[in-house]
């Protein structure tokens, strides 16, 4: 169920960092620093009105996910050595080559974690929680106080699963409105499943990282589709999702 009048209730946003990378302005003839500045501006805009939980994919060798990535054909294959002041390669070259993408994500996370001026300016009233390659997320709050969130530690490499875990945890423990900014069908199905299974009552929505797209009201969808929500997870797994193989020759089913 979609809606456009639910954003004022949101007190926490959980972001799919990899999805955000694709939609932000990619500076032509710029440096990596230029893009990092764009990313930080996006985060600071979200921090003005809510807590922000930023989640990136992890790249673990010899995992199910890494095997899937290797089987995906891309137009680019060159591995770059990225640093803040190196020229920024084309978007596809960075975001479709795992080695390049993981470097960019680490640079962004390091800049967000170590920029004390950013902390003082934008974490006065809202906190920023960053989940990157380290199993333990880092929380920055109250003018730059850095906390390692051992209670949220996870070794899962799939960002979609971590996003749902954090969104459900916030909704359960804090009882505040949560917005999940992602466009992955896996995330949508998992949100519906856990919202239903845990009998949550707090407000929850799912937004696309692309501005102007329809907002999905998770709470209203679960209420409206109670008769089928319980079976969506198994149906989606059988039809093919990021962590479960589909039948041979049958790709992902789009809802």
Image (tube, rainbow, N blue to C red):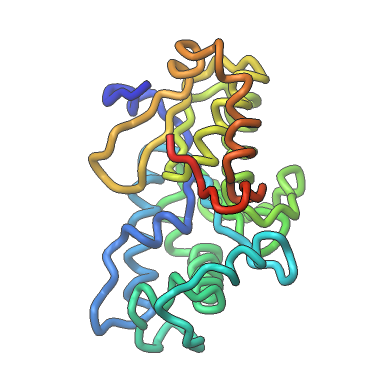
Q: Quadrant of residue 95?
A: bottom left
Q: Is residue 229 left or right of residue 38?
A: right
- The image shows residue 63, relative to residue 76, as above or below, that is above
Residue ID at (48%, 35%): 12
Task: Say left or right for 4 vs 67.
Answer: left
In the image, residue 243 above or below residue 104: above
Of residue 17 and residue 120, the one placed in the foreground of this image is: 17
Q: Report the front residue among 182 and 27.
A: 182
- The quadrant in which residue 232 appears is top right
Mark yes or no: residue 55 visible: yes
Q: Is residue 143 left or right of residue 242?
A: left
Q: Residue at x 43, y 64 (%)?
A: 117
Of residues 183 and 9, the one drawn nearer to the viewer in this rendering: 183
Q: Position of residue 254 (x, y in %)?
A: 44, 40
Left or right: where 219 falls relative to 248: left
Q: Name the residue located 74 percent from the left edge and 69 percent from the top edge.
A: 62
Task: Specify the quadrant that holds the N terminus.
Answer: top left
Q: Is residue 153 above or below residue 2?
A: below
Q: Give the number of marks.
A: 0
x, y (%) of residue 71? Answer: 58, 69
Residue at the front extreme of this rendering: 249
Where residue 206 appears, as percent x and y from the top left, is 42, 34
Q: Position of residue 39 (x, y in %)?
A: 37, 62
Indicate the quadrant containing the C terminus: top left, top right, bottom left or bottom right. Answer: top left
Q: Nearer the viewer, residue 100 or 121?
A: 100
Say if residue 145 shows up in the picture: no
Q: Residue at x 34, y 71 (%)?
A: 35
């Amino acid at each position: 169920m979609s809606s456009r009048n639910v954003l004022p209730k949101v007190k926490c946003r959980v972001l799919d960092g990899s999805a955000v990378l694709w939609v932000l302005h990619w500076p032509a003839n710029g440096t990596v620093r230029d893009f990092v500045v764009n990313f930080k501006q996006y985060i600071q805009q979200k921090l003005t009105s809510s807590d922000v939980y930023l989640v990136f994919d992890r790249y673990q060798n010899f995992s199910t996910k890494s095997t899937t990535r290797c089987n995906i054909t891309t137009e680019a294959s060159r591995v770059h050595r990225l640093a803040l002041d190196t020229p920024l390669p084309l978007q596809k070259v960075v975001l479709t080559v795992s080695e390049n993408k993981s470097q960019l994500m680490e640079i962004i996370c390091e800049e967000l974690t170590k920029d004390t001026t950013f902390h003082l300016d934008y974490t006065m009233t809202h906190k920023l929680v960053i989940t990157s390659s380290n199993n333990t997320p880092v929380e920055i709050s109250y003018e730059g106080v850095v906390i390692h969130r051992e209670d949220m530690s996870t070794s899962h490499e799939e960002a979609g699963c971590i996003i749902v875990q954090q969104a459900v945890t916030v909704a359960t423990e804090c009882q505040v409105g949560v917005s999940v900014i992602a466009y992955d069908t896996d995330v949508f199905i998992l949100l519906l499943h856990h919202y239903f299974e845990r009998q949550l009552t707090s407000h929850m929505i799912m937004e696309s990282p692309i501005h102007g797209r329809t907002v999905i009201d998770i709470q209203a969808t679960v209420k409206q589709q109670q008769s089928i929500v319980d079976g969506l997870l198994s149906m989606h797994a059988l039809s093919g999702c990021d962590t479960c193989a589909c039948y041979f020759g049958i790709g992902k089913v789009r809802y």
